[in-house]
Image (tube, rainbow, N blue to C red):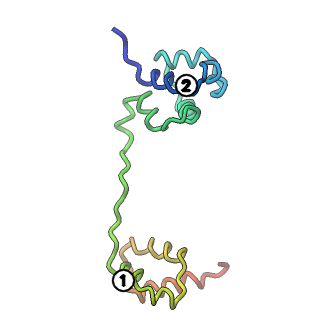
Amino acid sequence: MRNFNQFGDTVKRHREALGLTQRTLAEKLDVEPSHVAFIESGRRKPSLKLLARLADVLGLDRQDLLVQAHPEAKGLIAETKPERRKISPSWRRFIENKHLLDRYNVTDRELRALEGLSFLGTVDSAKEFLAILTLIRDIPGK
């Protein structure tokens, strides 16, 4: 019964799809061709440094390739979920007040900085946002 070698099969399949021989792949990775053969056959696992180069050369996702080479690492890799930040009512009122933003010539860059502060939840009014904006604008050396 053949031992399933998903990692080696993935490397070989992508190498061949790119029209690379084991020798040319080895040259790109700065390893011996026999090392590529051992990786594809499942007799060797690449170091993390080589795994990263292998993923880059073959155009593969580094994390996916890591999990294929070292399935035990899957439990160590936290799935990243986009963090949903709740927009505070005071921030919403501030950014929707176009007249106020125009009157104080608030730039997009300044809005991004103030938005970061809004996520801290400590600013309660447009007046406080404007006070912080004034402080930002008056920073010496800016």
Residue 18: % across, % down: 57, 28
Q: Residues within 10 Å of mark 1 (few under 14, many from 20)?
A: few
Residue 22: % across, % down: 60, 19
* Quarter holding residue 139: bottom right
- Kind of element beneath mark 1: helix
Left or right? Give the position of 112 relative to 25: left
Q: Residue at x 59, y 33 (%)?
A: 57
Instruction: Identify which amino acid the numbered label 2 is placed on.
Output: Arg
Q: Nearer the viewer, residue 58 or 137?
A: 58
Q: CA distance from mark 1 to mark 2?
A: 54 Å
Residue on which the image places disc 1: 93
Quadrant including the C terminus = bottom right
Looking at the image, is 1 positioned above or below residue 51? above
Left or right? Give the position of 21 relative to 46: right
Residue on which the image places disc 2: 15
Looking at the image, is 52 positioned above or below residue 108? above
